[in-house]
Amino acid sequence: MNTLVFEGIATSGKSTVIKQLQSSLEGKLKIRVAGEDETHEPIMSNREELHTDFYLDLLSQFTLKHPDLLIVDRFYLTQALRAKTNLKPYKKVEAALRPYNPMTIFLTVEPATIAGRIDKTVQHRSPEWESHFASIGGSREEQAIYYIAQQKSLLELLKQSTLPYKIFDTTNYGYESIAKEIIGLIERR
């Protein structure tokens, strides 16, 4: 079993790359995708808590049916950022992930393009996204500044991880080629 944990700011393309992987691997592997509705949204209101037991329980649930590939959209890295902590409290989570051949896939976006990515997201996704971005700051520039800082902080947390990781730049999109490269990483593991 292989596990891919996707991390990155909103608009970085996590959902799109995950869909590309699903499409490319359909019928070849038994895939379990754990979306933000399972991993991130249930604990969003409790920013300060670490939620390590929550993540350990989720991992047990995700692996029950022994998929060939487990894909997780956001996990403990995002919560470490929200709780304003380092990764030390999540060592148990990383230890629990280790038997499942994990790799964190981190998607980055060039800071100068983030405001434009926010605009595109608002145009192509549900109206709730405009409300989400508005809750961060009034102008696109303020929102972009928030996400630039968030991306930088997430990358610093990623460097603390004991698990392997790969960083992909999605500034120029290229989601299909990123998915192909990830498939190559899976096949070599």
Image (cartoon, grey):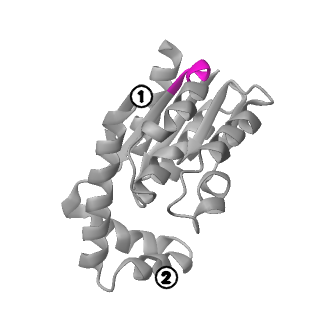
Density class for disc 2 (Cα within 10 Å; few <14, some 14-19, many ≥20) is: few
Q: Quadrant of residue 150?
A: bottom left
151 relative to 184 in the view: left or right: left
Q: Which mark is residue 111?
A: none
- Residue 172 x, y percent position in the rendering: 29, 51
Q: Tag 2, which secondary structure?
A: helix
Q: Earlier in the sequence, mark 1 or mark 2?
A: 2
* Residue 56 position (above or below residue 136): above
Residue type pointed to by label 1 = Glu
Name the element at disc 1: helix
Q: Is residue 135 visible?
A: yes
Which residue bears the numbered disc 2? 131
Packing grade of label 1 (10 A; few <14, some 14-19, many >=20) is few
Asked whether 171 or 91 is in front, the reply is: 91
Q: Nearer the viewer, residue 70 or 179?
A: 70
Q: Residue at x 45, y 50 (%)?
A: 80
Instruction: Residue 171: tell me if it is visible.
Output: no
- On whether residue 175 falls in the magenta region, the answer is no
36 shown above or below 137: above
Amino acid type at image mark 2? Ser
Residue lying furthest left: 112
Q: Nearer the viewer, residue 23 or 166?
A: 166
x and y percentages locating residue 157 in the rendered image: 35, 43
| Segment tinted magenta in the rendering | 98-102
Residue holding disc 1: 181
The main secondary structure of the magenta stretch is: helix
